[in-house]
Each structure stands twice: as structure tokens, then as C-alpha cells.
């Protein structure tokens, strides 16, 4: 069994390599947070643990690389925007492998929200592969806003070795946790 300490980040690339034109900008923001000496944020990036694979690589080569990265990860950070559910490329495969094979929790991050106290209300953001696993009880998901302190907290707390929380697909931080993280006012 592989040593599973990485964070796998999944996002809808929108068929572009432009770092500002798709959800890759949120992945890049996490890398910036991690690289900053002024921020206490460490990202053990699963995508940097294997050789780079470009979109021009054969589909099977890319699939094998993604599987290796997922198998070496302790959780998935899944960036969910209004367009994620429309991804027809790799996001559905990544979600299915993470939940069905790797049994890892999903940290669902929403850039469009400052707080999340009712994840079911965000189901319009969920790709069908995630929604079906949430509804059938096989997914363990914590839903949080894409805010640095919330993302850092979730990355530190939730992994394959922590089987207690989130216990289902509708996990979210309490109102008190939102206040503590500065997401909402007391």
C-alpha cells in the first residue's frame, strides 16, 4: 500500500490551459498559499509526486498517472463552481476513483460562497457522479467555502485515516466553526 499523504486537487479545466480562464486558478491559488513564507499553509501536492502529463498525452497514460496520484492521496479537494457539473473530461473519473476505490473523503470547496451551512442547497454544483454517491451514502464529503483558513483546516483534519468525520456526503462546519474561522460574524 502506498504512503497516502498527498492532497489531490480536482477542478474543471474547461478545455483550456489558460491559468485564468478556468477553475485551475483555484488550484494555483492553493499552490501560492503553500509557497508563501507569510502564510502557514502546507500543501503536499499529489500532482507533483508523479511526472507531469500533458493533455496531448495518450488517454491511457493520463489515466494511469491520475490513478497513481489518487492512490497516493489522503483526500481530494474538489473545486465546485457552476461549470464543474458540465465537465466531460476527467473530473467524473477522479471523483469516482477517489470515492469508490480509494475510499477517501472529499473536501468540496465553493469559490462562490463565503459560508456553507446547508450543503444540500448547493446540489446544482455537483457533478452527477458526486451527487449519486452523496445520495447513496458512499461519499464522505465536507462542504466548505474556498477560503484559505477553511481549506487549511479541512486539509489538516480530513483524510483516509480519519474515518469519523465527515461520515456522510452532507458534512459542513458548524456555525461556531464558521465564526472561529472568520467566515461569518458572531
Image (cartoon, rainbow, N blue to C red):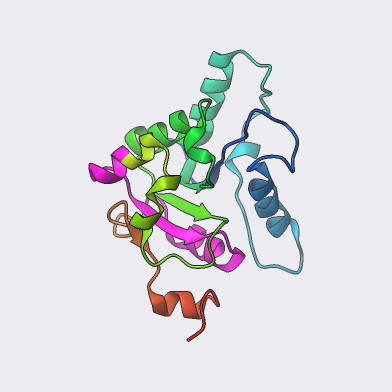
Q: Position of residue 161 (x, y in %)?
A: 37, 52
Q: Quadrant of the N terminus?
A: top left
Q: Residue at x 48, y 80 (%)?
A: 179
| Quarter of the image where one finds residue 182 | bottom right
Of 76 and 42, which appears nearest the observer? 76
Of 51 and 166, which appears nearest the observer? 166
Of 125 and 72, which appears nearest the observer? 125
Is residue 184 one of those drawn in magenta?
Answer: no
Q: Is residue 5 left or right of residue 173?
A: right
Q: For the magenta stretch, what is the residue range?
A: 132-161
Q: Position of residue 6 (x, y in %)?
A: 54, 46
Q: Position of residue 32 (x, y in %)?
A: 73, 55
Residue 127's place in the image compared with 121, above or below, is above
Q: Position of residue 98 (x, y in %)?
A: 41, 37
- Residue 102 visible within the image: no
Is residue 158 one of those drawn in magenta?
Answer: yes
Q: Residue at x 54, y 60 (%)?
A: 151
Q: Residue at x 40, y 57 (%)?
A: 142
Residue 61's place in the image compared with 96, above or below, is above
Amino acid at each position: 500500500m502506498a504512503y497516502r499523504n498527498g492532497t489531490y486537487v480536482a477542478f474543471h479545466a474547461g478545455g483550456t490551459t489558460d491559468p485564468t480562464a478556468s477553475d485551475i486558478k483555484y488550484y494555483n491559488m492553493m499552490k501560492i498559499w503553500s509557497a508563501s513564507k507569510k502564510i502557514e499553509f502546507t500543501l503536499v501536492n499529489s500532482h507533483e509526486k508523479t511526472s507531469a502529463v500533458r493533455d496531448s498525452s495518450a488517454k491511457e497514460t493520463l489515466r494511469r498517472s491520475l490513478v497513481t496520484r489518487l492512490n497516493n492521496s489522503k483526500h481530494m479537494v474538489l473545486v465546485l463552481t457552476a461549470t464543474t457539473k458540465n465537465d466531460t473530461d476527467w473530473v467524473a473519473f477522479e471523483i469516482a476513483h477517489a470515492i469508490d476505490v480509494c475510499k477517501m473523503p472529499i473536501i468540496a470547496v465553493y469559490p462562490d460562497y463565503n459560508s456553507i451551512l446547508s450543503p444540500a442547497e448547493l446540489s446544482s454544483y455537483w457533478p452527477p457522479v458526486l451527487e449519486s454517491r452523496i445520495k447513496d451514502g458512499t461519499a464522505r464529503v465536507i462542504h466548505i467555502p474556498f477560503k484559505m483558513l477553511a481549506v487549511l483546516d479541512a486539509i489538516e483534519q480530513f483524510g483516509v485515516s480519519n474515518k469519523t468525520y465527515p461520515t456522510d456526503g452532507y458534512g459542513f462546519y458548524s456555525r461556531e466553526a464558521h465564526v472561529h474561522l472568520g467566515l461569518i460574524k458572531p
